[in-house]
Amino acid sequence: MRRSLIVIGIGVALAVSGGIGVASTTDQTTAPTVSSPAQVVPDSGQDLTATITALQSTLRRVPEDHVSWAGLSLAYVEQARVTGLASYYDKADEAAARSFEIEPDENFHALTADAAIAAARHDFGQALDSAEQALAVNPRDLGALAVRIDALNELGRYDAQLRALRTADRLQPSTAIAARYSYAYELRGDLERAGDILRRAAASATRADQAYVLTLRADILRKQGRLPAAGRDLDTALRAVPGHLPALVSTARLHVARGELDAAVETWRDVVSQQPLPEYLTELGELLEHLGRDQEAATQFDVVRTTIELLDASGVGTDLETALFEADHGSADRALTQARAEWDRRTSVHVADAYAWALHGAGRDEDALRISRAATRLETPEARFWIHRGTIEAALGMTDAARTHLRRGLDTDPGLSPWQRDRASATLARLSDGPGNSTKGTR
């Protein structure tokens, strides 16, 4: 999901300076004009390793350098994301704690590191608190500004997200903020404007940032059905940063959109060998199941369960991912327990969708529809949101509404998991011969 690149992918979030052009403020959500970015943590694995080595070398020479300790903490957060090894979060904690020991007062560098760690562990309330503490000391710290935007987004506080975006663009315009402006528009269904922001950002970006923003733009182009253009952006991204993992994820989905399912399997295998996140493993498993390779699919789903256990044990919150996985491939009771726990913490559209789907699995479709309407309140072009809503409406006998929303979901993203597409198409087919029920509407 695009959300993963924005929130979990901390690397671009932790830019510390930048000469990005200031946004026009003719309306509340006008996008920034981009000129040039900078990052503290490079996005490629090779550069990241070099950064960690350099910081460690600096700290051997100057062990009381609290800024370098905080920088090392951020680098470890990024290393956890790149490698999928949650043990790096413990290293990040230790480095941030050392920075605080050296400089306990007004240490916004370590506060930003704490915010990044909390966001990576999906503790978005803590991430927001730490980011705001950092900004109280240094209102222009771009890392803290970016994490605050992400946390507000994940908490479902969308009006506050826009205010935080405008503040960040005024104080510290950058590629990091441009990407978040783009996502704000994407969440609200304005794919054209979201893609245009990323196009302008890529025009003057460093190679690492170019790979990042072109991958995000390729996802938007795919949703618009512009598959050749999406392929060109991904080719450029992979030339800029060979092996760029988010670009490989996007490439796997583009293969699906093109009907190149065997190629999609191979690309997904490459992805999960490097970063075995539950959502990636699930997508590979669903693709294998669609292809009739049931034993291979079952093996992938077993790995999902193991991965979730390991992440939970390391303090990374996985209730959202667990709820979606269990609702489709496991226990309806466990799905509901996990989804309700996440809903109690935050009310983003993604959590609303997972909660609605879990309620549907538990047979509570009236409650599910209410929450599903909350999930689609921003008109977000996320295929599953609309498929889930349409399926819930079908269960309630709301045939016209179900048809409308199932078709909308199926039309939203040609790169949707074929297994998910099969189920939605089957539900729609069952409705095709039944009488409409326009009395309940499609709102």
Image: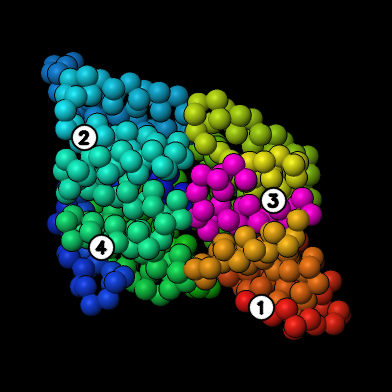
Please name which of the two marks, 1 or 2, marks the residue nearer to the observer.
Answer: 1
Task: Tell me which numbered mark, 1 or 2, is placed earlier along the sequence.
Answer: 2
| Residues at marks 3 and 2, CA–CA distance in whole angstroms | 40 Å
Q: Horizontally, is 27 left or right of 218 in the view? A: left
Answer with mark 4 or mark 3, whichever residue precedes in sequence. 4
What residue is shown with label 1?
Answer: 442
| Residues at marks 1 and 4 touching, judged by CB atoms closer than 8 Å | no
Q: Where is residue 426 in the image (x, y as percent from the top left)?
A: 80, 66
The amino acid at mark 3 is Ala
Reading the image, the residue beneath label 4 is 166
Q: Residue 245 got which mark?
A: none
Q: Distance between the residues labelled 4 and 3?
A: 35 Å
The residue that appears at 35% across and 25% down in the rendered structure is 93
Q: In this view, does 251 lie to the left or right of 327?
A: left
- Estimate the spatial distance between the alpha carbons at disc 1 and disc 4, rounded to whole Å: 34 Å
Which residue is identified by label 3?
Answer: 358
What amino acid is found at the position of numbered circle 1 in the picture? Thr
Q: Mark 2 points at which residue?
A: 109
Instruction: Let me know if residue 250 appears in the view.
Output: yes
Q: Find the distance from the CA under tag 3 to the CA under tag 1.
A: 21 Å
Magenta stretch: includes residue 38: no
Horizontal and vertical percent for residue 183? 40, 61
